[in-house]
Image: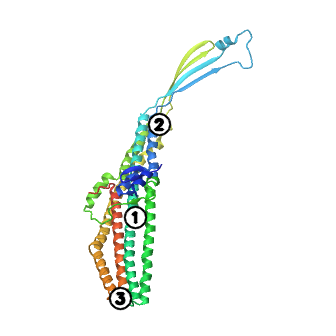
Amino acid sequence: MAASVCGSLVLVDSACAQQGPVTVTLDQAIQMALQHNHTLQAARTAIQQDQAAEITANLRPNPTFFTDWEYLPVFTRQQGTSTADYLQNSTEGDMGLSYLIERGNKRARRLEAAKSATAVTRSQVADNERGTTFQVGSLFINAQLAESTLDLAQRDLKSFQETVDIGEIRFKDGGMSENDYLKIKLQLLQFQTDVQQALLNRTQALSDLRQQLGYESVPAGYDVVGEFEYKPLVVTLDELQVKAVQNRPDLRAAVLGVTAANNQYALAKANGKRDPTISANYSHVNGISTATWAFSIPLAIFDRNQGNIAQTRIAIRQAEEQQKAANGQVLTDVKDAYEGLQESAQVAQLLKSTYLDVAQRSRDISEYAYRRGALALLDFLDAERTYRATQLAYRQAVAAYLTTLEQLRQAVGTRDLL
């Protein structure tokens, strides 16, 4: 049975239905995505795979057991000799054990290299979580914008419907020409179309967000809830860049990549050491039992793992350059997001502090004057369009500001910017 979120609790769908519509805040949406997003869950399995590779890296070589029995009679039989005597005195049997002794601390080097690879993967998965958090935040804001736009469209439709009703009364009483009445009635279509488009945008935004949350983690009829308003953020660029260097998982992965490259280099040098093999053997030949031991080691004349050693040494320099590039990218990301936030904040602040109130008062005055016959229809419709455009522009500015705020959080690597 699929589970969903009712407030802050995880409950089954039937229980949610009894409690009413399911609403999700931004923080809840992010937590749900971190727990249920299938792409993220698939990425996390890479950590478990690397941890399994650590087990393999830490294993010792297996000993080798060997045995043989030679000169067994198959098609011939010795005259005057029993089979038991023949097996005892005329065949050869060997049994032995050999073991490869690793030199150069290879097992420890393998384990260090495997653990450093796991650490890099863990940071890369954390970076995937950072990206998922930003995607959820952006889609959540899109859903909020769609909700706010729908609310505006419905209120505008209701208000304009009242204007149409008044116009119809005036037309029937002879106070308005038929042409003006038809013009205002046709204008109603735009308001109705705006509502339908807003409904579609809301449905699509919630559907896109649901995919990121984990499709089965919320029911189809869920909704988003939370503040959708411009609030200034007071923080300096230097503070944000310092935080980013401390928190960005992709930079941490690049730093760990240098450690991993050094561990691979140490492993390559260890693999250049030749490993001896010792063996012990028991033999029974012609009724005589003997024991043999042997020692062998490859002579490092030609192959001393020179190529891998050189390759891994160069890979260290590559990892160091990648770390420097990642550090520069972090600082660049923070600056770009910070500048974008400042620009979007100015637009939102300008609309909120001045033009929203101006558009509202202009529309109210025009509506009042029009209903009393003191303003031409075209002037009233123009004031109505300006009001709607200004209200919509403010909502879009708020969405742009909140989206750039999410970009800044992504660039810094933490949601706590203060």
Asked if residue 128 can be seen in this view, the reply is no
Asked if residue 404 can be seen in this view, the reply is yes
Taking the view exactly as shown, the residue that stands out farthest to the top is 80
Please say if 202 is above or below 67: below
- The residue at which mark 1 appears reads as 142
Q: CA distance from mark 3 to mark 2?
A: 84 Å
Q: Nearer the viewer, mark 3 or mark 1?
A: 3
Please say if 8 is above or below 393: above
Q: Give the image location of residue 397, x and y in percent.
A: 34, 70
- The residue at which mark 2 appears reads as 56
Q: CA distance from mark 1 to mark 2?
A: 47 Å
Mark number, residue 254: none
Q: Earlier in the sequence, mark 3 or mark 1?
A: 1
Q: Nearer the viewer, mark 1 or mark 2?
A: 1
Secondary structure under tag 3 reads loop
Mark number, residue 376: 3
Residue type, numbered disc 3: Ala
